Amino acid sequence: MLLILLSGLFLALCLFAALHDVNRLTIPNWLNITLAVLFVPAALVSGLPLEMIGGHLLAGALAFVIAFGLFAFRIFGGGDAKMIPAAVLWMGPSAAIPFVYWMAIIGGACALLLVIGRRSVPVSAVPGFMRAPFEPKAGVPYGVAIAGGALMAGAASPLLRSFYEAIGLGG
């Protein structure tokens, strides 16, 4: 039961990060830290063998190195580069590839919609809570893609699977 609650909290915080990113084009450090730190109690109560938990840690570490490189080359913002490894920590090796796949698909869709929206909708017509991405030269709120990837791939993660089963979406 505690794992289901922690998993639900993780996914809810991912959604909050996406909304915050749309609103301000930032993902706060406290939020990324919370996403990563929640992994510890989830791993402890999950009953997963240590080698599987180690696999989650290695996947998160690899994601950190890759995301840091993408940040260094200004492909991702700092908040995105911190949220990706926090999410991959929860996904682990079994869900990391589906996570990256869905993150890329959703990120591409967001970028395409923003390009179309920026060309066809005046900034003044966009509701205030989501105006930031429509400003000239604004970036893409990639927190939406990261959260979407986590939601879509979560059922493949051993840590999140029980949450999906509890809400009737598990396999």
Image (spheres, rainbow, N blue to C red):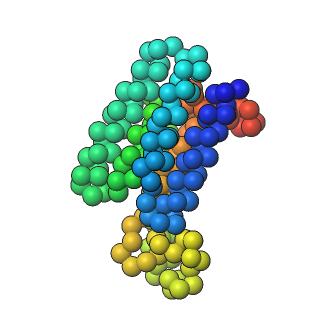
Q: Residue at x 67, y 34 (%)?
A: 5
* Frontmost residue, 86 versus 95: 86
In the image, is residue 145 above or below residue 121? above
Closest to the observer, 58 or 169: 58
Question: Is residue 126 left or right of 77 when viewed as pictured?
Answer: right
* Nearer to the camera, 110 or 90: 90
Up-down relation of residue 148 to residue 110 (above or below): above
- Can residue 18 be seen from the camera position used here? yes
Q: Residue at position x 43%, y 60% from top?
A: 26
Q: Position of residue 135 (x, y in %)?
A: 43, 77
Residue 96 appears anywhere in the view: no
Figure label count: 0
Expressed as whole percent of the image width and height from the top left, the position of residue 64 reads 34, 39
Residue visible at 59% across and 77% down in the picture: 127
Viewport quadrant of the N terminus? top right
With 93 as the anchor, is 70 left or right in this view?
left
| Relative vertical location of residue 122 with respect to residue 73 in this rendering, above or below | below
- Name the spot of residue 38 as percent of width and height, x first: 52, 34
Quadrant of the snapshot with the C terminus = top right
Q: Is residue 49 above or below residue 130?
A: above
Residue in the image at 59% along x and 43% along y: 11
Across and down, in percent, residue 95 comes to: 50, 33
In-front residue for pair 59/101: 59
